Image (cartoon, grey):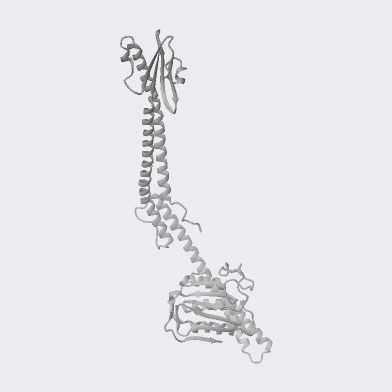
Amino acid sequence: MFATESVPSMRFRVAAAVAALALLVILAQSVAMFSLFEEKEEEFIESLITQQIAHSMEVWASAPEAAYPHTPDMQLFRIAKGDALPASLPGPIRQLAVGNHELYLDGREFHVAVRDDPQARFILVYDVDDHENRLRGLRLITLTAAVLLALLVLLVTYVLAGRVVVRLEHLARRVANGSPGSLVEPGMERELLAIAHAVDGYRAQQEAQLERERDFAAHLSHELRTPLTAIRTDAEMLASQPDLPAGVGKRALRMMGSVDRVTALAGSLLLLAREAQPALPEKVLLHEAVQGVWDALQRATPSPLELTLDVPAECVVLADPSLLDLVLRNVFDNALRHSRAVADGCIVCRLDGTRLSIIDCGDGFAPAELAHVFERFYKGAQGGHGLGLALVDHVCRATGWRVAAQNAADGGGEVTIDFGAALEVSGQTGFLSSTH
């Protein structure tokens, strides 16, 4: 299974991609606009100081006072031929040649125009820091607007994408819930329609394959039962003859037991191949069901082990009797195979709330086995065909019960079946504890 909590949804990915694209476009346009704006601003400043110094030089002869700029950002210096440069003129400006210049003093940008005429040198210094501040403010406003616009695009795209993805999510829920019938709905978009048709086709193939497997399993079971029934009948007739040697009678009984085991194995395989759907549930006395399974197993394969049964006498399970019998039979068969066959050994079956626990008197499950005991065809150290507990798990899933395996605190393997709401105890008294 893939974890889905940390994976972004397709809806968010689409919205994020569109928003990122919009942000890139806006930023690209902003960069181009600012580059053009800076270029035009430089041209404007160069034109401004060129016109201003030309005007100042022109009017100086007739009206020197009118030659000075009427803005505090500009300073005009006139140095007559042979005069020393004024002390207020910064050092870097003193060394500038005739022409227009751009330089930085103490972190501020200045544009300087230097001109000569026959009588003097004119130096116009223009502090453009106000221009730069306005430009920086415009950059900040544009960047903020770009981010806000990208967030707006993200929100709008997320909402619009949700209207598209919601139908895909609806289709996914129908598939997950196993909705019967075709997944195609009126008004489906072309892409969703293609997905619905593909899933419908796959489901049809799966149903056809399952039906073929069910038919094959049913025919195989029938073909197996016919010769097995004949063999068991012959073995029964042979065992019923009074004048047979003792060895022949034992062999006949062994044949009957072997046929019964093969028949049970075939039935288990058939049930695993099919959907183990319970029939109409009935009220079954759990104590009697457990005791009946134990007695049947003891008749088939006598064992020195004893059963300690702690189950309320009036405890009732709402279940399919055949499936309940199958679950109990396989759990007890597993417990018998894993227990040590000693005279004082016992298998404990007790009810705690809604949980029925069967504890064997063996060595318990190996740590490496616990994760695999319910897998099909998994064989532990005691061997077997690896279907018993797999069948138990299969039936419990179909009936809504839960099964778990662990090692008991006092030793031995423990298999617990939680019947949940299917279990009823009509009274608080009458709890039967007996040894058989």
- Above or below, comparing residue 22 to residue 100 in the picture: below
Percent x, y of residue 42: 40, 24
Horizontal placement of 342 versus 208: left or right? right
- Above or below, comparing residue 139 to residue 431 in the picture: above
Q: Nearer the viewer, residue 246 or 232?
A: 246
Horizontal placement of 128 versus 302: left or right? left
In the rendered image, which quarter is residue 435 located in?
A: bottom right
Q: Nearer the viewer, residue 117 or 399?
A: 117
- Above or below, comparing residue 372 to residue 118 in the picture: below
Report if residue 320 is visible in the image.
yes
Q: Nearer the viewer, residue 128 or 83?
A: 83
Percent x, y of residue 263: 57, 77
- Above or below, comparing residue 278 to residue 25 in the picture: below
Percent x, y of residue 360: 59, 78
Q: Residue at x 39, y 30 (%)?
A: 34
Q: Residue furthest bottom?
A: 242
